[in-house]
Structure formats: structure tokens, C-alpha cells
Amino acid sequence: MDTKTNPNSADKASTVNTYYATTPIFYVNAEPHIGHAYTTTLVDVVTRFHRLKGDDTFFLTGTDEHGERIYQVAMSKGQTPQEYTDEIAGKFRAIWDSLDIRYDEFIRTTEARHKEVVRHILQRVYDRGDIIFGEYGGLYCTGCERYYTEKELVGGRCPQHDIKLEYRSEENYFFRMEKYRTWLRETIEDNPDFIRPERYRNEVLAMLREPIGDLSISRPRERVPWGIPLPWDDKHVTYVWFDALINYYSALESRGLTERYWPHVNHFIGKDIVKPHGVFWPTMLKAAGLPIYQHLNVHGYWLTDSGKMSKSKGNVIKPLELKDKYGNDAFRYYLLRDMSFGLDANFSEVGLAERNNSDLANDLGNLLNRTLGMLGKYRQGIVPAAAELTSTDLELKAAFNTLPQEIVRLFDNLQFDRAIEKVLEAVRKANKYIADTQPWVLAKDEQQASRLNTVLYNCIEALRCASIMLEPIIPQKAQELRLQLGLGNRNYTLADAAQWGLTPAETQTQSGEPLFPRVDLAALQQAIEVGEEALKHKAEVSIDDFAKLEFRVAEVTKAQTHPKADKLLVLTVKVGPEKRTIVSGIKQWYQPEEMVGKKLVIVANLKPVKLRGILSEGMILAAEDKDGNLSVTTLDRDLASGSEVR
Ligand code: MSP
């Protein structure tokens, strides 16, 4: 499978039976969403598949907890970064548990064991002379935690977050990445499947055709206190990507598993983070004298009608909502079946429901119900022994028993949707087999009793084999299916799906609830339309609701920079006789002194909130254009402070 060409593979020619797969470690500045759920479910499916195959398998996931953005979010919530990251890391774990994700290790970049390895690697690269000190300026996105070149921007804005970027310059340490550019380009050229699918390999090769420059790998600790201090200069903390990427290695290193798993590492990521993984990471590893990873596997994005799903645009779907509505396994099945690895796919609830109905309820569910129904009716629910197989039977048997090998090949090629479709094709063949052999006709003729036994037995075997091959994707339902077949206490390997005849005769089946209840599509469609209609109305505010807001004129008497946040101003204002404090994010546009004396419009009855430790008692109104320029709302006649604005 996956060792053919990589120069760092442990065992080049032999079949690899060790497999190490990783998800990105997710930022904790947002709650888990469908995008995170996809990568993690995918890696869960892939690692379950390798375990089923008998491979020595390790699955790593975790959370990325350092950096400026996370620090800011924690502060805005009035929490310490540690409290905040503990909380969100806990949410990620809980969601993975509820999605039946079986990771072997969950790493957090704030753990001591990780920090130690990061500092060790940094020191090593520094000692080799590949980290130097210098000044850097450029356009920075705190969402991505990186600088962008003009060329990478879309309409002057961050391509990921669609925001205008701020110019920044600071003294940083730099990793001499450019030094390794030619080496990396040649390595990728010599190893066609190092980065897969090909479109992303080409993307990285294109990046490497021009100078990549050196990578700024530190931030002043004064500005970003939430990070790992550099071992040789604790006035600087490690840049979040340098810190985060090392998780893939530190998780193994801290458990003494490096030798066993590192040579087999497969990273799975979304297309948004190709550059850090395709360029930063291999050059970092090379500079640290460590073997590079085996494969970088890049998937596309799940899209909704309103564009790419992301935290900054807010249109994230809570995975749990649909998983609870349709069941874990239908949800997992949809994610794996409806995305071709590497390409984008459209996420829709209707799509999920349709998949549930067509593949799971109709094809698989029907095969089970019909088989157990007939077995109950004709054989008291007891599996009969099969007699000799006819050519029709042999065809069915072959359709299933050649599949495991085919599926291994498809999984190795990252064609997960095709692999699933292959199993479903076989399931459909089994349904057709029932239609062709007509057991209900056989049942009427005593002479055909043995033939009927054989047909029923073959249907049971088809179900058993299908359940094994689908188990990584629908783990709970595959187990339930086998419980109904009377095989609940047996553990199967993938090889057992290549063998016909493993169900013992006399097994007592146990038909139960339908595995995948059918969804009423018409009702769903209608509910969606009603929901959309309701949403439209929600956007309109009734006059009564509007009347709840109290706007007033406030005069600024004092203004100063927030002691803990360089983007905030702390304003003291007079609202009639009353004095109030308002914390406002306008520092970028207004100097404190130019605010004094201004008469502004404020929302006066907003519930007070603490912003970075200072209680803000109201909000000032300001206008913002599409380029992010801002102007506070003032009056064009001089009215008394405290006047009501309507
Ligand atoms: N913390 C970094 C990764 C560091 S890895 C050393 C990060 N975190 S993230 O929380 O933003 O997660 C990005 C990843 O989430 C993507 O690479 C992808 O795996 C997943 N997805 C986020 N949105 C997605 C979709 N809409 N569709 C599919 N997956 C996407 O970047």
C-alpha cells in the first residue's frame, strides 16, 4: 500500500501493516463544527478500516490552543486562556465521543509533554544555524495566524476570512525555510504520491517555483503572552504554526511510540491548510534532522448554499443536531459517501435524508428485513445449512468475496465514496438475487426445500459480509445488524468478508427494529420551507421590539487606551447627569484625545459586560464601509447630552 515511493518509509517493498493517521489539531477559538467533524470522522473511518484489516494502527487528534487569536477570544469572554482552552478542548472531546470517534490519543498544545518536544526541536534547529533574528513587516491575518503576500489576497482581503488585513512589523526570529526549497521541490517531484490528490501536489509545487522566503517563527511575548517561550530567548514565544505542527510528532515522542509509528504517518487535512503542511512542515522536519511524513492527504470543503462554512462567516452547522436527528451512522455514512476526496461537496440535510433512504433504508435495510422475514416465515428464524451452490449463487458469492481486496485498493487511493458504492452495489445484487431466485415460490414446493435453504443461507452470508465491510463507516448499525443475524458475539476481520460460509448453520436469528428508519422527504422539504419563511420574518424587527432599545446622546469627557488591549478605548461619557464607562473597539480609527468633547449616539440600555476586565455600560454607534473604514455617529446640531434618539 502506501510505502512505494517515499524515501523515508520504513519498509519499502513489503506490505505495510502499521498505520498512523492524524487530523489537524483544531483551533479552540470556535466551537466544533461540521468541517471539523468531517475530517475527524474520515480519519476514524480510515483507522477503523486499518484495524479491521489487522494493521497496527494509531489515530491522533487534538486541539491547537496557543496564539494571539485564542488569547483575544479568552479575554473577550473574561476568562483566562487556560480556563477557556480547557472548556473548548472538553467540548471537542465530548463531541468526538458522541460521534463514536475512537482516537488513540488526544493532544493539546498546552500540555507540558508537547511544549517540551517543541522546545527541544526549536533548540535543535537553532543550534544548526537555521533560525536567525530579524525584522519583518507584512499583512497579517489573526484568523489564519499568518502573514499574506499581496498576491495571495483576494480583492485585498484574506482569502479565508474575507477581512481587510492589517500591516504589521516586528522583530522576529526566522526559520531559514528558503534554504530547503529546492530540496523540497525535488522530493515532491520524485515522490508523486507524497501530497495527494494531485491538484494539491501541483499547488505546492507552484508555491515552490518561486522563493518562499524565511518563515517568521516567533512573536513578542509582550504582545502574545499565550505561547511557548523560545528556549534561548524567553522574550519571544513560538509562532503558533511552528508549535502546532509539531503535535504530530510530540504525541508519539511523549509516549515512546515514535519509532513504531512515525515512519507510517498519514496526515489528513482540509485544503485551507495546505501551505503550512506542504511547505512549512517538511522543511521544519528536514531542518530538525527528522524523517518527513509519508503522505499529506488533502480533502475539499463542505459547502452550504451561502458559501464556504467557516467560523468567521457564522454559517456553521452543529454536527450534533443532524446526528441526533438521523442517527450517528446515517450521518457518518453521508459524510463519507457524498464527498469525493479532494473535491468540495454541498452539504444539505435533504441530501443526508435521501442517502439514508436510498442506500441504508432501501438497499441495506430491505435486504435485512426481507431475509429475516423469510427466514422467520419458512425456517422459524433458524439459519439452515446450504447445499451445493449454483452458478447464480456463485455469482453472488464472488460479488462479495472479491470486494475486500478491491476496497483495500480504493481506501489506499483515498476513494472512500467509491469503496462504499462498491459494497452497496453488492447489496443491490443480493436484493436482485432474491428477486431472481424467488424464495416465496420455492417455499411452496417441498421438493425445493434444500434449494430454499441455500438461497436463504446466501442472503445471510451477503449480509454478514456487507456488515463487516461497512463497519468502519456505520459501526453501531453494523453491530446491530449482526445481532439480528444472531452473530452478535463474534468479532470479524476484513478477511472474513472474503470467505463465504462462516455463518454456522442453526444460528438463531433475532429480527428487530429497522436499522435505518425511512425519512419522510416530502415532510422534510416542507419543514425546511417553513423554516426559511420563518427566518425571513425573523430578520424583520417589529416596532415593539425596536421600542425596547434606548438610544441617547452621550458626551465624551475622558478617553484612554485600554490597559490590557491595544484595540480598545475606554471612554468616560456623560448621559445627562449620569456618568458612564464605555469600552469600544475604535482605537484603530480614533486617538483618545480626538474623542474628548464629541457627542455620540449610544445604545443606553444594553446589559453591561466586562471587556478585558473593564465594565462597559453601553455601546456607541458607528458606521463601517466595506473596506473597514469606520466613523462614529455624531450629531450635526449641538444637543444636550442625555437627549433621546428615536
Ligand atoms: N489549528 C489549525 C490546524 C493546525 S494542524 C497542525 C487549524 N484549525 S481549524 O480549527 O481551523 O481547522 C481547520 C480544519 O478543519 C481544516 O483543515 C479541515 O480539516 C476542517 N474544516 C474546517 N472547515 C471545513 C469545511 N467546511 N469542510 C471540510 N473541512 C473543513 O486550521
Image (cartoon, rainbow, N blue to C red):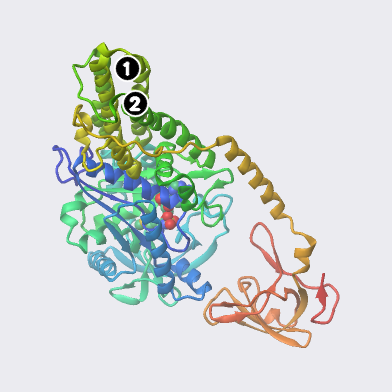
Horizontal side of 125 relative to 38 (left or right) equals left
Q: Quadrant of residue 429?
A: top left
Check if mark 2's residue and mark 1's residue have beta carbons within 8 Å: yes
The residue indicated by pointer 1 is: 443
Please state which amino acid type lies under the numbered disc 1: Ala
Along the viewing direction, whichever of 386 and 14 lies nearer the viewer: 386
- Residue 554 seen by the camera: yes
Q: Quadrant of the N terminus?
A: top left
Q: Earlier in the sequence, mark 2 or mark 1?
A: 2
Residue in the picture at 63% in, 72% down: 586
Please state which amino acid type lies under the numbered disc 2: Lys
Residue in the picture at 21% in, 29% down: 498
Secondary element under disc 1, as helix, strand or loop, is loop
Q: Quadrant of residue 446?
A: top left
Residue 254 picture location, percent across and down: 21, 64
Report, in whole angstroms, how far the alpha carbon at label 2 lies from the one at label 1: 10 Å
Find residue 392 and name its label.
none
The residue indicated by pointer 2 is: 377
Residue 592 picture location, percent across and down: 65, 80
Disc 1 Cβ-to-ligand 1 distance below 8 Å: no
Horizontal side of 367 relative to 120 (left or right) equals right
Q: Quadrant of residue 409?
A: top left
Q: Residues within 10 Å of mark 1 (few under 14, many from 20)?
A: some
Along the viewing direction, whichever of 21 and 170 lies nearer the viewer: 21
Q: Is residue 599 above or below residue 102?
A: below
Residue 464 picture location, percent across and down: 27, 33
